[in-house]
Amino acid sequence: MKIDPLNILLNKDVELNKNYYFISGNEKTLIEKITKTIILKYQKNGGYDLTRIDSIKNFVDEKSLFETKKIVLTNNCKDLDEDAINKTKETKNVFVFVGENSQKIKKIKSFFINDNDSYLIDCYELDKSSKIKILNNFIEKSKIKIEQDVYWFLIERLDNRYMFLENSLNKISEIDQKDISLINIKKILVSNDSGKEKVFFNLLKKNKIIVEIYREKITTLSDVNEFYYYCKFFCQLIIDCNNLEEFRKKIPIYLFKEKVFLINMYKQYNYKKKKLLLKLLSSTEKTLRTESNLSLASGLRFLLGIKRITIS
């Protein structure tokens, strides 16, 4: 069965009660948000333990004395087919498969659409109607009042990528109701677009310069979260691509000025460095989630950590 990812995030009468979830598309921040939402639901409400596997063929249903329930996550859909899924049907585990769109997964996506015990969740950049749904939900939950001119300005200017849009709304929720004017909202969004991602492209400069640029651009918790997702996008691009030509093709067009920097950076990475980068992403995200009072320092350590791995 195919469902809209926003129906999950906005709690629109979607019960997460399936045994199989296939999360696909090309909007990485939305894919990540949906994946986390599903996993946390099963961990909090069902007592499931998270298990990560490289491939569905590597899954072994290990019986334990205490009958621990598992939610199994894999980001590799290479070996995923109907036979592999059917072999897991007798287990009482929940499986989450994550894979970006490609012709190779077209057939398996059809299976998930038609399977009653599955959800297919396609994640793409937000369009205008999606942003209206999200903004309306935000206004209702936060109980703030927004004038019509501010409302439509937000619809036009909020980012089409989910996590960046969410970070903008978090900033708005932090200001006093009396300060929610078009002028102040413009300042917030201009601040959001003021080059936080550019900090990443100064990665190979001297540490003193990196620290100065970071402290100028990153000043709040929302800034750190937004900055983290910018960096994670670039890092994940490096990790996921198997060769330089694949990496070159996946660099977004709007980053044409930074293309040479990114290509040179990718050339520095081998399998060992990619594993270290993945470990750094995971540990930083955990710190940002559990120790928000240390977020500014954590963001800087994260940036310098990427540099250390890159040049090692």
Image (cartoon, rainbow, N blue to C red):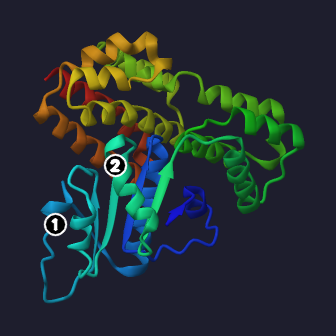
- Where residue 165 sits, quadrant-wise, is top right
User: Element under label 1?
Assistant: loop
Inspect this view and state whether residue 292 appears: no
Residue at the farthest bottom position = 65
Residue under the point 67% across and 52% down: 134
Disc on the earlier residue, 1 or 2? 1
Location of residue 10 with respect to 234 vertically, above or below: below
Location of residue 199 with respect to 49 vertically, above or below: above
- Say if mark 1 contacts mark 2, CB within 8 Å: no
Residue under the point 39% across and 80% down: 46
Left or right of residue 293, residue 85 in this image = left
Inspect this view and state whether residue 213 appears: yes
| Mark 1 or mark 2, whichever is nearer to me | 2
Residue 221 horizontal/vertical position (percent): 51, 43
Q: Nearer the viewer, residue 49 or 306?
A: 49
Q: Quadrant of the C terminus?
A: top left
User: Element under label 2?
Assistant: helix
Residue 166 horizontal/vertical position (percent): 59, 46
Residue 281 horizontal/vertical position (percent): 30, 42
Q: Nearer the viewer, residue 262 or 245?
A: 245
Question: What kind of residue is marked 1?
Answer: Phe
Location of residue 75 with respect to 245 vertically, above or below: below
Question: What kind of residue is marked 2?
Answer: Ile
Residue under the point 36% across and 19% down: 210
- Where residue 261 sits, quadrant-wise, is top left
Rendered image: mark on residue 105: 2
From the image, tell me which residue sits under label 1: 59
Residue under the point 76% across and 47% down: 176
Q: Residues within 10 Å of mark 2 (few under 14, many from 20)?
A: some
Q: Residues within 10 Å of mark 1 (few under 14, many from 20)?
A: some
